[in-house]
Image (tube, rainbow, N blue to C red):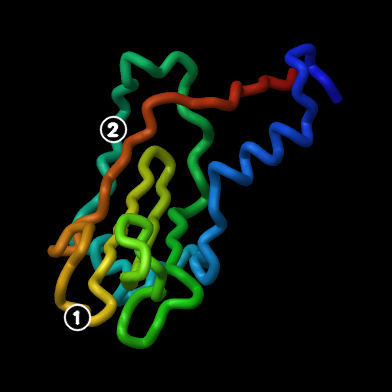
Amino acid sequence: GDDGDGKGQGDAQQNIQDIFQEMHRCDIQWTSEPDEIRHAYVKDYSPHQTDELSPFTSPPPPPPLPVPVHAIMMHDHDIGGVLLESQMMPGTYIRVQDELSLWENELWINDRGHDAEDIERLVYGNWDGVPYQMKRVSTLVESVVVP
Protein backbone atom coordinates (compact mmCIF):
# COMPACT_ATOMS: atom_id res chain seq x y z
CA GLY A 1 0.00 0.00 0.00
CA ASP A 2 1.04 3.52 -0.78
CA ASP A 3 0.22 6.28 1.71
CA GLY A 4 0.92 9.08 -0.74
CA ASP A 5 4.63 9.53 -0.07
CA GLY A 6 5.69 7.24 -2.91
CA LYS A 7 6.95 4.54 -0.52
CA GLY A 8 5.08 1.32 0.01
CA GLN A 9 4.85 -0.75 3.18
CA GLY A 10 7.62 -3.00 1.89
CA ASP A 11 10.01 -0.02 1.93
CA ALA A 12 9.02 0.84 5.50
CA GLN A 13 9.57 -2.77 6.61
CA GLN A 14 13.00 -2.80 4.97
CA ASN A 15 13.91 0.46 6.76
CA ILE A 16 12.95 -1.07 10.12
CA GLN A 17 15.12 -4.11 9.40
CA ASP A 18 18.03 -1.78 8.56
CA ILE A 19 17.66 0.02 11.89
CA PHE A 20 17.10 -2.89 14.28
CA GLN A 21 19.27 -5.95 14.68
CA GLU A 22 17.96 -9.00 16.49
CA MET A 23 20.30 -10.02 19.30
CA HIS A 24 20.41 -13.82 19.13
CA ARG A 25 20.56 -15.74 22.44
CA CYS A 26 19.29 -12.64 24.33
CA ASP A 27 15.77 -13.93 24.94
CA ILE A 28 14.38 -13.30 28.40
CA GLN A 29 11.97 -15.29 30.52
CA TRP A 30 9.44 -13.54 32.79
CA THR A 31 8.26 -15.02 36.08
CA SER A 32 6.41 -13.79 39.17
CA GLU A 33 9.17 -15.17 41.41
CA PRO A 34 12.48 -13.28 41.43
CA ASP A 35 15.66 -15.34 41.12
CA GLU A 36 17.24 -15.40 44.59
CA ILE A 37 20.71 -14.51 43.29
CA ARG A 38 20.12 -12.63 40.05
CA HIS A 39 17.36 -10.41 41.49
CA ALA A 40 19.09 -9.78 44.85
CA TYR A 41 18.57 -6.05 44.27
CA VAL A 42 14.84 -6.55 44.90
CA LYS A 43 15.65 -7.28 48.58
CA ASP A 44 18.12 -4.38 48.85
CA TYR A 45 15.95 -1.72 47.21
CA SER A 46 12.22 -1.18 46.99
CA PRO A 47 10.24 0.41 44.17
CA HIS A 48 9.27 4.00 44.83
CA GLN A 49 5.52 3.58 44.94
CA THR A 50 3.88 6.98 45.37
CA ASP A 51 0.44 8.39 44.89
CA GLU A 52 1.85 11.51 43.26
CA LEU A 53 1.17 11.93 39.59
CA SER A 54 3.84 13.36 37.34
CA PRO A 55 3.02 16.74 35.79
CA PHE A 56 3.17 14.87 32.46
CA THR A 57 0.52 12.34 33.50
CA SER A 58 -3.00 13.18 32.50
CA PRO A 59 -5.01 9.96 33.01
CA PRO A 60 -4.74 7.95 36.23
CA PRO A 61 -2.35 4.99 36.20
CA PRO A 62 -3.69 1.67 34.89
CA PRO A 63 -4.91 -1.01 37.28
CA PRO A 64 -2.02 -2.61 39.16
CA LEU A 65 -0.33 -5.71 37.83
CA PRO A 66 -1.43 -8.78 39.79
CA VAL A 67 2.15 -9.27 41.02
CA PRO A 68 5.52 -7.82 40.10
CA VAL A 69 7.25 -9.77 37.34
CA HIS A 70 10.96 -10.43 36.92
CA ALA A 71 13.08 -11.64 34.01
CA ILE A 72 16.50 -13.11 33.32
CA MET A 73 18.24 -13.99 30.08
CA MET A 74 17.40 -17.58 29.09
CA HIS A 75 20.74 -18.44 27.48
CA ASP A 76 22.98 -17.07 30.22
CA HIS A 77 26.39 -18.75 30.43
CA ASP A 78 27.63 -20.51 33.58
CA ILE A 79 30.28 -17.83 34.19
CA GLY A 80 27.79 -15.03 33.58
CA GLY A 81 26.33 -13.40 30.55
CA VAL A 82 25.76 -14.13 26.89
CA LEU A 83 28.84 -13.79 24.68
CA LEU A 84 28.19 -11.16 21.99
CA GLU A 85 30.34 -9.24 19.55
CA SER A 86 30.85 -5.65 20.70
CA GLN A 87 28.97 -3.09 18.61
CA MET A 88 31.46 -0.40 19.65
CA MET A 89 34.58 -2.45 18.83
CA PRO A 90 33.78 -5.05 16.12
CA GLY A 91 35.95 -8.14 16.44
CA THR A 92 35.98 -8.01 20.24
CA TYR A 93 33.49 -9.73 22.52
CA ILE A 94 31.66 -8.91 25.74
CA ARG A 95 29.49 -10.91 28.11
CA VAL A 96 26.08 -9.28 28.48
CA GLN A 97 24.04 -10.00 31.59
CA ASP A 98 20.54 -8.55 32.18
CA GLU A 99 17.89 -8.82 34.85
CA LEU A 100 14.60 -6.95 34.70
CA SER A 101 11.87 -6.27 37.25
CA LEU A 102 8.50 -4.70 36.47
CA TRP A 103 6.12 -3.22 39.01
CA GLU A 104 2.94 -1.23 38.44
CA ASN A 105 4.79 2.08 38.11
CA GLU A 106 8.45 1.15 37.69
CA LEU A 107 10.76 -0.82 35.42
CA TRP A 108 14.19 -1.76 36.73
CA ILE A 109 16.95 -2.94 34.40
CA ASN A 110 20.17 -4.38 35.80
CA ASP A 111 22.20 -4.36 32.59
CA ARG A 112 25.94 -5.12 32.60
CA GLY A 113 28.61 -5.95 30.08
CA HIS A 114 31.91 -7.57 31.04
CA ASP A 115 35.11 -8.11 29.07
CA ALA A 116 34.92 -11.61 27.53
CA GLU A 117 38.51 -12.39 28.52
CA ASP A 118 38.34 -10.92 32.04
CA ILE A 119 34.89 -11.28 33.67
CA GLU A 120 36.04 -8.96 36.50
CA ARG A 121 36.47 -6.06 34.04
CA LEU A 122 33.16 -4.19 33.73
CA VAL A 123 32.62 -2.54 30.33
CA TYR A 124 29.25 -0.93 31.20
CA GLY A 125 26.63 -1.07 33.92
CA ASN A 126 26.67 -0.60 37.69
CA TRP A 127 29.48 -2.46 39.45
CA ASP A 128 27.42 -2.65 42.67
CA GLY A 129 24.49 -4.31 40.90
CA VAL A 130 22.17 -1.33 41.34
CA PRO A 131 19.64 -1.40 38.49
CA TYR A 132 18.48 1.55 36.42
CA GLN A 133 15.20 2.54 38.07
CA MET A 134 12.68 4.09 35.69
CA LYS A 135 9.34 5.45 36.88
CA ARG A 136 6.17 5.60 34.84
CA VAL A 137 5.48 9.17 33.80
CA SER A 138 2.39 8.64 31.69
CA THR A 139 -0.13 6.07 30.60
CA LEU A 140 -0.46 5.32 26.91
CA VAL A 141 -3.65 3.27 27.14
CA GLU A 142 -6.89 5.08 27.92
CA SER A 143 -9.18 3.58 30.54
CA VAL A 144 -12.56 2.48 29.29
CA VAL A 145 -15.50 2.54 31.67
CA VAL A 146 -18.27 0.12 30.75
CA PRO A 147 -21.69 1.04 32.21
In the picture, the quarter occupied by the C terminus is top right
Query: Residue 47: x and y, percent?
Result: 28, 47
The outermost residue toward the bottom is 78
**Which is nearer the eye, 102 or 97?**
97
State yes or no: discs 1 and 2 in contact (Cβ < 8 Å).
no
Give the total number of marks visible in the rendering: 2
Q: Residue type at mark 1?
A: Asp
Q: Seen in the image, is 126 located left or right of residue 96? A: left
- State how far apart marks 1 and 2 are (Cα): 41 Å
101 up-or-down from 12: above or below: below
Crowding around mark 2 (Cα neighbors within 10 Å: few <14, some 14 to 19, many 20+) is: few
Q: Quadrant of the N terminus?
A: top right
Q: Amino acid at mark 2?
A: Thr
Callout 2: SS: loop
Report the disc number at residue 50. Answer: 2
Which label was assigned to residue 31? none
- Residue depicted at x 54% and y 47%: 20
Q: Work out whether residue 27 or residue 9 is closer to the camera in this orientation and state it.
A: 9
Query: Left or right of 12: which side holds 19?
Result: left
Q: Quadrant of residue 146?
A: top right
**Residue 64 placed where, x, y %?**
49, 40
Question: Which residue is labeled 1 in the image?
Answer: 118
What crowding class fits label 1: few (fewer than 14 Cα within 10 Å), some (14-19), or many (20 or more)?
few
Identify which residue is drawn at 61% across, 23% down: 143
Percent across and percent down for residue 33 are: 44, 68
Q: Which residue occupies 32% across, 70% down? A: 92
Q: Earlier in the sequence, mark 1 or mark 2?
A: 2
Which label sits in the foreground, 1 or 2? 1
